[in-house]
Amino acid sequence: MPGNFEIKNVFKNIPDDLTGEFFETIAETKNIRIERIVSRGHASPDGFWYDQAENEYVLLLKGSAALRFKDENEARVMHPGDHVIIPKHVRHRVEWTDPDGDTVWLAVFYN
């Protein structure tokens, strides 16, 4: 198929200064949003829980992180290739991400 299609790499063009997590929308329609998220030692603020109005599929591509669900006592450690579906309104948080390197996530939000 001919065209002018830009090839990008999820591991490139990451800002040097990541004071906060880096969020980039890769594609979006009215029913789905695909994001690249880059963390570097970031975590959810103390006492904060995500409670999203949409389902989320998240795939850890690089680095490591711990994801905790409100109804569980222990965080789940994630490594490259690990993925999970988080149904809407399931409260969760990021306990930690790798402080020594980039943690790259691919998140798909959908209804």
Image: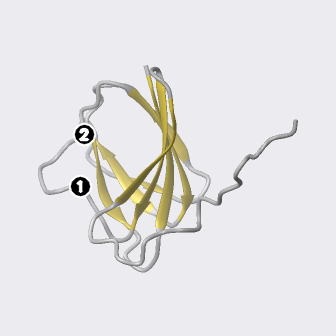
Name the outermost residue toward the right: 1
Q: Residue at x 36, y 25 (%)?
A: 54
Within 10 Å of disc 2 (Cα), the crowding (few <14, some 14-19, many 20+) is some
- Residue 86 visible in the snapshot: no
- When the figure is inspected, residue 85 is found, relative to residue 43, above or below; the finding is above
Give the camera-side residue of 84 and 61. Answer: 61
Is 23 left, or right, of 49 in this rendering? Answer: right
Q: Residue at x 37, y 76 (%)?
A: 99
Q: Residue at x 23, y 55 (%)?
A: 44
Is 101 left, or right, of 73 in this rendering? Answer: right
Give the camera-side residue of 12 and 78. Answer: 12
Mark positioned earlier in the residue sequence (2 or 1): 1
Within 10 Å of disc 1 (Cα), the crowding (few <14, some 14-19, many 20+) is some
- Residue 97 position in % (x across, y down): 37, 65
Model colouring: secondary structure
Q: Residue at x 28, y 31 (%)?
A: 52
Give the camera-side residue of 51 and 23. Answer: 23
Badge 2 vs badge 1, beta-carbon distance below 8 Å = yes
Label 2, label 1: how far apart the Cα atoms are: 9 Å
Residue type for callout 2: Tyr
- Residue 6 position in % (x across, y down): 70, 52
- Residue 19 position in % (x across, y down): 27, 71
- Residue 66 visible in the snapshot: yes
**Dividing the image into 4 quarters, which one contains the N terminus?**
top right
Rendering quarter of residue 55: top left
Q: Which SS class for mark 1?
A: loop
Q: Which SS class for mark 2?
A: loop
Give the camera-side residue of 3 and 70. Answer: 3
Which residue is labeled 1 in the image? 44
Is 49 left, or right, of 80 in this rendering? Answer: left
Residue type for callout 1: Ser
Which residue is labeled 2 in the image? 50
